[in-house]
Amino acid sequence: MSTDQVIALRPRERRPRRDDPYDGTAAFRPEAAAPRTGAQRVQMALTGAIVVAPPAALAAGVWLAWGRAITVTDVLLGLALYTVTGLGVTVGFHRLITHRSFTARRWLRVALAVAGSMSFQGGVIDWVAIHRRHHAFTDRPGDPHSPYRYGTGLRGQLRGLAHAHLGWMFANDPTATRRYAPDLRADPAMMRVGRAFPALCALSLTLPFAAGWALAGSWHAGVTAFLWAGLIRVALLQHVTWSINSLCHMIGTRPHPTRRHDRSTDLWPLALPSFGESWHNGHHSDPSCARHGREPGQIDLSAELIRLFERLGWATDVHWPDRGHRRTTPPSPS
């Protein structure tokens, strides 16, 4: 079978036209979905397991901890892994690899991609492709996870909120990495990190179990560390990240100009747990900027880490915001 024949068998990606009529209030025009392939069904099952397992672990962790406090080891391990994997997503997947907000030394680029992969949010190439597509069609037909997919009425908004938060992962709406991430497909290091995604997820759960066992000297400590610093940590980080897709397009302030139909917002309560990603309107006003918190007092821990990398000489060509200047014409999305 030729390469062209293989490609023809893949689900055809929908390619909305930028000039499609859309008034900003109507539901996106429904399109006929292609039948799911066997590989897609397996992928949906794995996605479901990733979504369901962490909350189930939370329930198990509460049951195990009933009547006694969670150990300090569980808390510290959870915070450490949350920070490493979270910054792997925000600094690595998002600001460095997706938007090229700065240039990193090759070892740092790979290390950040590995850390982001351990967050259970998908392989680096798929993650980047989906996010670039989101910027290309923000809150209009073509956006894979807009909360305005079903219109702006109350029922549509509630349905759209659920879709933007996690429902989009189960939709039969593939994003072509050939189109949105050709640079990563041509990068052998990123291809290797992408293929290693399942192994890195396993490592993300094995590390807390091994650390808990080693530090406390019992299998029970390993199991509780696995639950709290492993699965529950994954659940918290996932829902914070998904909230950027959902809440940060519906609730909050919009101090910066963005493209037509773009409803991204700044939502301050999520600033710390999201490492600055919830300054989402600031990000959409200038996607390639390394700092998303554009206003005074907006804490952006991801930007502070990038600044540290710059001072150490590990990051160069950092795109910092111009002081006292607000961009009036939003730039290219990727």
Image: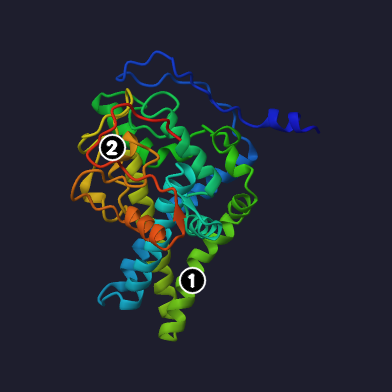
Quarter holding residue 68: bottom left
Q: Quadrant of residue 309?
A: bottom left
Q: Residue at x 58, y 37 (%)?
A: 177
Please tell me which residue is depicted at 64% across the width and 40% down the height of the picture: 38
- Percent from the top left, x then y, of residue 97? 49, 47
Local secondary structure at mark 2: helix
Picture coordinates of residue 93, whole percent (x, y)? 46, 49
Residue 35, picture quadrant: top right
Q: Which mark is residue 281?
A: 2
Mark 1 crowdedness (10 Å alpha carbons): few <14, some 14-19, many ≥20:
some
Please indicate, yes or no, whether residue 240 appears anywhere in the rendered image.
yes
In this orientation, which residue lies closer to the viewer: 132 or 323? 323
List x then y, in percent, for residue 23: 32, 15
Decide if residue 72 is on the left or right side of residue 252. Answer: right
Residue at coordinates 28% horizontally, 52% vertically from top-left? 300
Residue tagged 1: 207
| In the displayed structure image, the side of residue 115 where residue 41 appears, left or right | right
